[in-house]
Image (cartoon, rainbow, N blue to C red):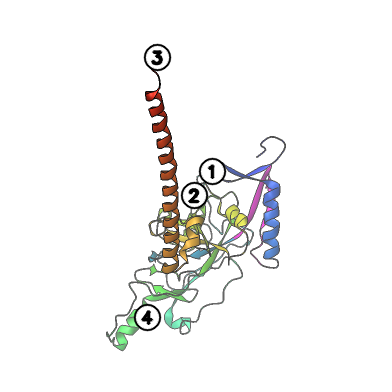
Amino acid sequence: MDYGGGEYLVPCGKDRYISKNELLLHLKTYNIYYEGQNLQLRHREEEGELIVEGLLNISWGLRRPIRLQMQDDNQRIRPPPSSSSWHSGCNLGAHGSVLKPSTLPDIQVTDVDAAGNGAAAKPQPEETPQLMRTRSDVGVRRRGNVRTPSEQRRIRRHRFSINGHFYNHKTSVFTPAYGSVTNVRINSTMTTPQVLKLLLNKFKIENSAEEFALYIVHTSGEKQKLRGSDYPLIARVLQGPCEQVSKVFLMEKDQVEEITYDVAQYIKFEMPVLRSFIQKLEEEEDREVKKLMRKYSILRLMIEQRLEEISEGPTAM
């Protein structure tokens, strides 16, 4: 987008733009950080528009179980034949709607007995579903409840795995381990809702994308929600490549509140330290109040004296 003066601007959100040269500098730093890794990003121009594409790491930050679509036993869905595919085998309509996918990521559903005592399969080099093993609410074993061997065999027949990580196949309830990382291949023209739908489709999650949101979470405690008009890949590049500083999290909308930088800098302090801050602020407030009261008391005396001078002066004839 050319906004006068010949400077090309790239949209990064609603009514927010960044110059092409500045974005390319951020992108250069990003790729140097990930040199030799598959997280490097590519860019090109198409019809005068700068397009950045590549893998975006997203951390799971869900507090409630999610529902996975049912799969037939030992059914294997193969990944896209080309690693350069933008959408990981998912076609997006003009308005961000997900069309019927022609191919889906490599998801293996196997019986737990064939999984080799829970050993995880080898991760793929890129775009690999990484749902870490956790216990679902349905599959938690009650303490003190001893099952017979036949019952245990029956339960095992209903526990299946994604890349070696088990979930309850009968109910398809699953909770990804908090902080575990997956990735999706996207480009800089995809908005937050499109990325959400792509991620849910990649893992065949039945929950609606409206239940979730993407957040940029900083180590300081700051949490910034990505709006529907934001472009997550652009946001990641502008935040910088180091995930020890900030990460992109998938979280429930109703479970997370945004935290500004001003608030985040106080979160990690202990309560005694915070109380001392409050005490100092209250003392400063008292000093300012007393200063204002003295100022206006002096002004009041000056006004009263002047009124007395006027009233005692000679009356006009």
Query: Quick one: SS at disc 4?
Result: helix
Residue 128 percent location from the top left of the image: 55, 68
Query: Quick one: SS at disc 1?
Result: loop
Name the residue type under label 4: Arg
User: Distance between the Cα atoms at labels 3 and 1?
Assistant: 70 Å
Crowdedness near tag 2: few (<14), some (14–19) or many (≥20) residues, C-alpha within 10 Å = some
The residue tagged 3 is 316
User: Distance between the Cα atoms at labels 4 and 1?
Assistant: 50 Å
The residue tagged 1 is 14
Query: Quick one: SS at disc 3?
Result: loop
- In this view, the mark in front (4 or 1): 1
Question: Does label 4 or label 2 sit earlier along the sequence?
Answer: 4
User: Distance between the Cα atoms at labels 3 and 2?
Assistant: 73 Å
Q: Give the residue displayed 40% in from the left and 14% down from the top.
A: 316
Q: Which image quadrant is residue 55 in?
A: bottom right
Q: Main secondary structure of the magenta part?
A: strand
Residue 255 percent location from the top left of the image: 39, 60
User: Distance between the Cα atoms at labels 4 and 2?
Assistant: 42 Å
Residue 114 disc label: none
The answer, for residue 97, to whether it is visible in the render is yes
Q: Which residues are magenta?
A: 37-55
User: Distance between the Cα atoms at labels 1 and 2?
Assistant: 9 Å
Residue 126 percent location from the top left of the image: 60, 67
Name the residue type under label 3: Ala
The residue tagged 4 is 156
- Residue 197 in the image: above or below residue 177: above
Q: Which image quadrant is residue 173 in?
A: bottom left
The answer, for residue 187, to whether it is visible in the render is no
The residue tagged 2 is 227
- Residue 217 in the image: above or below residue 117: above
